[in-house]
Amino acid sequence: MRLYNLKDDSQVVSFVEAVKTGLGRNQGVFFPQQLTPLDNMDALLEMDFVSRSTQVLTHLIGDELSPNVVAEMVQGAFTFPAPLVHVADNLHCLELFHGPTLAFKDFGGRFMAQCLAQFSNSEKVTILTATSGDTGAAVAHAFYGKENIDVVILYPEGKISEAQQKLFTTLGNNIHCYSVKGSFDDCQAMVKQGFLDDELKTRLRLNSANSINISRLLAQVCYYFEAVAQLPKAQRNKAHISVPSGNFGNVCAAMIAALIGLPIQKLSATTNQNDTVPRFIASKKWQPHETQESLSNAMDVSRPNNWPRVQTMLDSGRFSYDDFFSHAVDEEQTALAMRELQSMGYQAEPHTAIAYEGLKADLAPEHQGIFLATAHPAKFQASVEKILNVELAMPKALSDALAKPCLAEPMSADYQQLRQALLAKLG
């Protein structure tokens, strides 16, 4: 697999190099030079999740890794299901929260850990990443206790739920967390500065574990195949998928799935009030606003890192703008959507409700609508219980984490402070 830097197309790397590098020159993200369709889609959709995912990832990665190696990595990463739940009529919910940290990012985080275990050759690596909610926990648990790997996680203080926070700030050992006085975009900017700092990058052997990293992105492609495979055979070519979108990695993966042959008819990338992309789709002007806090905090992103990848596929015509929708859903609409889903017998947290609300706007009667549940409702206990007037049962993974002390260190939104801390601790 050959990938090029979207900000510097002279930088062309292999899959292994892209995984180990994370971010390219000039803060550019890597993207495949070619995406070719898979053969025999009908047979592929009849396979089990792990077998099919092995085929999909082998096809994407190419001959850099043997099918046996890819199979071992998939078997080690995808140890939990992604069920498609029928909600009503032509509405289905793809539940992606059955992994160890109860969020969709377990798929990508665990596959990336498998990749680095294969590629690092026992050399010390430092994962530096920012989280708007769920990435931190998925990455922390995927790499916890692994030899020669330190993980540094920045998160915006007071702007993620306690359950989200405790799942990664209580681990310690090789997991180092910083609570930043600022927004997720501030955290992300500090991470990007780290990757531009040649001394820091070299001394700590920096890598990124958010959806900038191609290994996480390709892993996410697999569960879209699983979603379509669970539709009735006669309906598999009628999927309209709605993805709650913040950093736009998840919908980017869906688009890649479509480009390699998965019969996705329409895509909705639904945001909260941080509506940079919906406004861009309407006006073709890129005008990020200040990030706003919301019920769906994992989507509180105004400058999504993965948008260049999505725009590349749209501008090239490989996926049509006519089949791509992006709406913003405000706080009141989010709460109403949660209550509407509850009346249909489905309990959802805010991100899932936003995906449902965005899907409704454009879903045609002849299509099968699939909206993504990206987190377990208990990860947003306070807002879900208040809005739905219910008392949630707490999964053991969350109740155990909530009982532990937070080990994160406070930090200003100041790159030099981060730099000094990392060099003192890890350099």
Image (cartoon, helix red, strand yellow):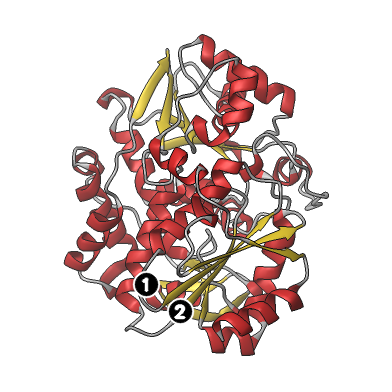
The quadrant of the rendering that contains the N terminus is bottom left
Q: Residue at x 22, y 46 (%)?
A: 40
What residue does disc 2 label? 125
Left or right: 369 in relation to 28: left
Between the residue at mark 2 and the residue at mark 1, the CA separation in whole angstroms equals 9 Å
Which amino acid does the dot numbered 1 rest on? Leu
Cβ atoms under marks 2 and 1 closer than 8 Å: yes
Q: Which residue is mark 1?
A: 116
Percent x, y for residue 48? Answer: 20, 41
290 displayed left or right of 321: right
Residue 110: give x, y in percent of width and height: 37, 57
Rate crowding at label 2 as few (under 14), some (14 to 19) or many (20 or more) other CA atoms within 10 Å: some
Q: Nearer the viewer, residue 6 or 54?
A: 54
Q: Residues within 10 Å of mark 1 (few under 14, many from 20)?
A: some
Q: Position of residue 333 (x, y in %)?
A: 70, 22
Q: Nearer the viewer, residue 71 or 193?
A: 193
| Occupied quadrant, residue 161 | top right
